[in-house]
Structure formats: C-alpha cells, structure tokens
Amino acid sequence: MKQIPNILTLSNLFCGALAIIFILHAPEYIAEFNGTTYTVTNPEPIYWASGLVVLAGIIDFFDGFVARLLKVASPMGRELDSLADVVTFGVVPGMILFRLLRSAYLQTPDVFDVSYFNLAPALLVPCFAAYRLAVFNLDTRQSEHFIGVPTPAVGFLVASFPLIVLYNPFNLAPLFGNVWILYAIIAVLCYLMVSSHPMISLKFKNLSVKDNWPRFLLVLFTIASIPVLKYAAVPFVFIVYVGLSLVVPPKASHG
C-alpha cells in the first residue's frame, strides 16, 4: 500500500518525460529566403506537452492526498515528489519557453544571427525551480502556506502559453511572439519562485469564511473566469493569485 503514492508520483514524472518528447519532436520543412534554400525546423505541437503538464498536476495533487489517506507519508516520498516536480514543472516549462523564444526569433529579420545564447535564459526556469524545491523541502514554515510561488503554479502558467498561441483568445497570441515579453516572463517567474513573499495555499483546515476568504475568492475567480476567458483564464488566475497573496499575505506559521 505504501508504494501507491510513489507510483502516482512516478506517473507525474512519466508525464513530464513524455512532454519533453513532444516538445523535442519538431518536423522539418524546406523554405526559401532571398533565393537560398534552407531546412527549417517547424515549431512543434507543444500544446500536447501542455495537456501532459495539466495531467501531471492532477496526479501531483492526488499522490500527497493518497499518502495522507493511507497514512504512508514518508520523507522518501517527499523527496521523490520534488524530483518529479523538477522535471514536470521545471524542465518542461523551461523547454516550452525555449521553443517559444525560438519561434519568436524566427519572426525577426535577424533570424539567422540568433544563437543559443539568445535562447538560454529560458533554461533559468528549471534552475530556479530546482532551487525552490530544495528550499521547500528544508523549510518548515510552508506547512500552511507557501514562501514564493510553488512550481506547479509556474508549470500550469507556462503550459497555457502554447494553447493561447494555438487558439488565440482575445488576440493574445502575438504577445508570445515578442522576445522581450518572453524574457520578462522568465525573469518574473524566476524571481517569484525564490522570493520570500508568503503565498496562499489551497489547503483548507476548515470551511470558515473568516479564515479562508482569500482562498474562496481565488476559487471563485477561477470558476468565473474559465467560461469567459477560456485558456487565457490561466494567466489571469495566476496574476490574481500573486496579487491576492501580496495584498492579503497569509499569516506566518511556525513549527
């Protein structure tokens, strides 16, 4: 019975590894530019990776829930969960941003002068995610709320970008074709993951409105925004989550 949560955690990791395969799978085609023929790697269907990140997030919620339900929570399971999260909510978002940056540069006049140096900032996301998870494992203050934005929230946010590009709600897709906007997103996400700002956790100890009104408000915003904003609801809810946490920071917990 104690291996059931671990199997779920490894399923999270499996989804992350499969998402990487989808991101790397890029069909090539021949294009002509100024009379010269080039082999161009087409921006791959990374929206499949988005779906896998969402599935992994659901699994990530249930592995801890099942461990507590079966009373088999262990330090090893906690470490395994963090290792899986580094891949699924760190490496995968970093690679998605890497590919979005690459696609954005393909639309610029100096596309053939772009090097990996221009794309490397996207790989800071998995580095900061790994650092955040290592700190989280040692930080006893984060039992009731988070210090800094949790990596699954970053994973969900970045996973929504390919879907926004694909379906273009409210004409937001061009934003992700701007390299400077992508650089700004990378910088903000890296900062938020390792910041010392208390962030709301959706762990309800009771159903008291007085004790949980920021959580209820966040859930309400999420439910109300999905039918209206579609895939754009994800960045909207992320902004509301961060803003609400900063305006009404959760009380510090010690012990």
Image (tube, helix red, strand yellow):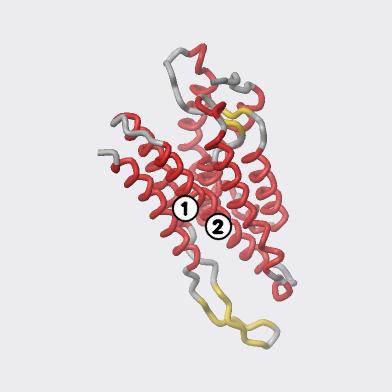
Q: Secondary structure at mark 1?
A: helix
Tell me what residue is drawn at x 47 percent, y 37 percent. Answer: 226
The dot on residue 96 is 2
**Disc 2 and disc 1 in contact, CB within 8 angstroms:** yes
Q: Is residue 18 left or right of residue 124?
A: left
Q: Position of residue 45 (x, y in %)?
A: 47, 63
Q: CA distance from mark 2 to mark 1?
A: 9 Å
What kind of residue is marked 1? Ser
Tell me what residue is drawn at x 51 percent, y 49 percent. Answer: 86
Tell me what residue is drawn at x 44 percent, y 43 percent. Answer: 81
The mark that comes first in sequence, 2 or 1, is 1
Q: Is residue 208 left or right of residue 59?
A: right
Looking at the rendering, which quadrant does residue 121 occupy?
bottom right
Q: Is residue 45 above or below residue 195?
A: below
Q: Position of residue 36 (x, y in %)?
A: 66, 87
Q: Is residue 190 above or below residue 197?
A: below
Q: Secondary structure at mark 2?
A: helix
Q: Quadrant of the N terminus?
A: top left
Residue bearing the label numbered 1? 50
Q: Is residue 25 above or below residue 135?
A: below
What kind of residue is marked 2? Ile
Tell me what residue is drawn at x 71 percent, y 67 percent. Answer: 108
